[in-house]
Image (spheres, rainbow, N blue to C red):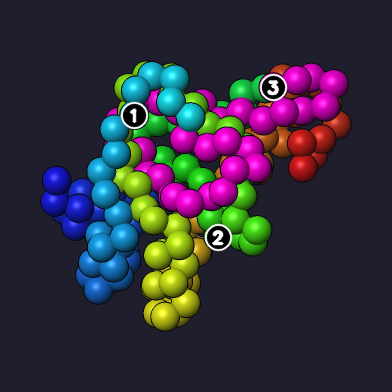
Amino acid sequence: MDMLAAIKAEPFFEGIPEKELALLADCGEAGTFPTGAWLLRQHAPAKHFYLLTGGLVELKAFVPQRGVVTLETLGVHEPLGWSWLVPPYQWHYDARTLEPTTALVFDAVRLRHEMEADHEFGFQLQRRVIDIMAQRLQAIRMQSLDVYGLPGGAFL
């Protein structure tokens, strides 16, 4: 697979300069995962960043007095994982494939190194991940209000 072409095709990376796209391509590879594969496990080391290119992934978390709940289902063109950016670099949630899934898989340690070496690259990537974090936190908040009848922010 031509990683650079695959990255250029993803809306998540739109607007990132060619030089930074080449850095991403050097840090990534194509991944294929069967149904039921765990991509993230809460408290496990966050070693990768995923951008889904096919399939579905269920994002889950343990909620006291409720057990394990599904927070969101992610599909094509959606990024997965932000804990690789924040020390101690451990996943905060679980993520499991619901069907055969493909993704662009990026080496988190290498990405952090490249982001430190090239601050413009770091800014571009971090801004996008922060946007996704904000969207996901808002979705979780709305779910706690609407579905579970919990006070706003109960998951946060």
* Residue that label 1 marks: 33
Position in image of residue 89 (x %, y %):
60, 56
The quadrant of the picture occupied by the C terminus is top right
Q: Amino acid at mark 2?
A: Leu
- Crowdedness near tag 2: few (<14), some (14–19) or many (≥20) residues, C-alpha within 10 Å: many
Can you tell which quarter of the image residue 77 is in? top left
Residue closest to the eye, 74 or 46: 46
Label 2, label 1: how far apart the Cα atoms are: 23 Å
Q: Mark number for residue 56?
A: none
Label 2, label 3: how far apart the Cα atoms are: 24 Å
Residue closest to the eye, 78 or 92: 92
Can you tell which quarter of the image residue 139 is in? top right
Comparing marks 2 and 1, which lies closer to the viewer?
A: 1
* Residue that label 2 marks: 85
Secondary-structure class at tag 3 = strand
Q: Is the magenta region chiefly helix, strand or loop?
A: strand
